[in-house]
């Protein structure tokens, strides 16, 4: 584990392997340990940097709202510290929102982009209301909110099969401080629509979605690649493709990296 200080805030990351830089950005209630299986595989031929986003893992909180842009700035700070000028970014869920913010702010740094169980669309009005409800729920019962949130990320038919894995994800999620959870929900709620990045950018792009994802409804999100050069990969399960479709995801990502 390594660390930089950004605006008097500790930002934690790991850095393994050599070669083309690949940045891994975790999702909401996750941290860099979510990449424990994928990162070593990618690091066989690449330099892999996994970053704890604001208020997650070993990175501190920074204020009451962790915007996607502020998270993108910590990614830039880590890359600058490592003297990395070009990178491929793989972002899971909220990590994808941060990757898109980074791509808008620093397009010259991007060699490729993978949105894993993520979307370039902004929150609908209904989802914004759900973010507010989530903030109330986590204030009332932190442990129950975290546990229920994690279970709902997996497709129903996988919940028994992956019971042990789900428990491990819950334990990691429960390390996320209350302020980190609320600040991230506020940040996701106000994020802007960035479908233009899929349409206008020239670097290689891949969107990976789960057919039974209860968080990002498949039919609503597959449409965003229309009239773009982004590749769509569909897995049969839920929001946690790195666990539910582990081997297939590894093959798809390695193929994407090899093609750049």
Image: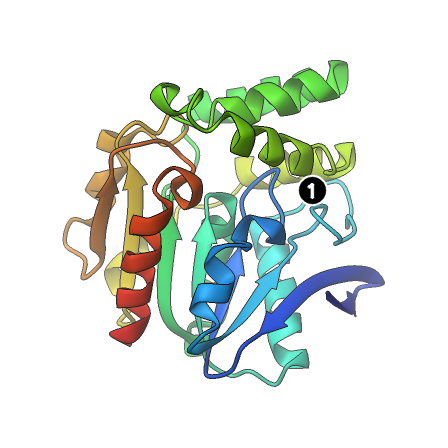
Q: Is residue 208 above or below residue 156?
A: below
Query: Observer-nearest residue: 224 or 211?
Result: 211
Q: Is residue 223 in view from this perspective?
A: yes
Question: Residue sitting at 40 percent across and 35 percent down?
Answer: 239
Percent of width and height locating residue 28:
57, 40
Q: Is residue 136 in view from this perspective?
A: no
Percent of width and height locating residue 40:
50, 65
Query: Observer-nearest residue: 150 or 76?
Result: 150
Percent of width and height locating residue 18:
51, 82
Percent of width and height locating residue 159:
44, 22
Q: Is residue 230 above or below residue 126?
A: below
Question: Residue sitting at 22 percent across and 31 percent down?
Answer: 219
Q: Please state, as top left, top right, bottom left or bottom right, where the C terminus lies in the image.
A: bottom left
Q: Find numbered disc 1 in the image and state the secondary structure of the residue it sits on.
A: loop
The coloring applied to the image is: rainbow
* Number of callouts: 1
Q: Which residue is mark 1?
A: 65
Mark 1 neighbour density, 10 Å: few (under 14) some (14–19) many (20 or more): many
Question: Residue sitting at 34 percent across and 42 percent down?
Answer: 245
Query: Observer-nearest residue: 207 or 39?
Result: 39
The reply, left or right, for residue 120 in relation to residue 101 is left
The reply, left or right, for residue 206 in relation to residue 130 is left
Q: Please state, as top left, top right, bottom left or bottom right, where the N terminus lies in the image.
A: bottom right
The reply, left or right, for residue 67 in relation to residue 44 is right
Query: Observer-nearest residue: 135 or 90?
Result: 90
The reply, left or right, for residue 172 in relation to residue 220 is right
Q: Is residue 200 above or below residue 220?
A: below
Residue farthest to the left, as pictured: 227
């Amino acid at each position: 584990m390594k660390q930089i200080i950004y605006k008097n805030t500790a930002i934690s990351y790991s850095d393994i392997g050599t070669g083309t830089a690949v940045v891994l950005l975790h999702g909401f209630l996750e941290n860099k340990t979510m990449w424990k299986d994928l990162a070593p595989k990618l690091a066989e031929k690449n330099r892999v940097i996994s970053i704890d986003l604001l208020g997650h893992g070993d990175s501190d909180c920074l204020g009451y709202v962790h915007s996607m842009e502020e998270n993108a700035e910590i990614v830039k700070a880590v890359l600058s510290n490592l003297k990395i000028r070009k990178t491929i970014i793989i972002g899971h869920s909220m990590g994808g929102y941060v990757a898109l913010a980074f791509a808008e702010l620093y397009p010259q740094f991007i060699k490729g982009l993978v949105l894993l169980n993520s979307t370039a669309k902004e929150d609908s009005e209904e989802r914004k209301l759900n973010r507010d409800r989530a903030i109330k729920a986590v204030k009332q019962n932190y442990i129950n909110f975290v546990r229920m949130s994690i279970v709902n990320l997996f497709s129903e038919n996988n919940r028994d099969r992956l019971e042990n894995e789900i428990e491990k994800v819950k334990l990691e999620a429960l390390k996320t401080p209350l302020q980190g959870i609320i600040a991230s929900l506020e940040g996701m709620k106000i994020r802007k629509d960035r479908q233009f990045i899929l349409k206008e950018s020239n670097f290689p792009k891949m969107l990976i979605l789960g057919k039974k994802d209860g968080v990002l409804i498949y039919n609503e999100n597959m449409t965003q690649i229309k009239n773009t050069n982004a590749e769509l990969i569909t897995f049969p399960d839920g929001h946690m493709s790195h666990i539910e479709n582990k081997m297939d995801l590894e093959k798809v990502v390695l193929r994407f990296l090899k093609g750049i």
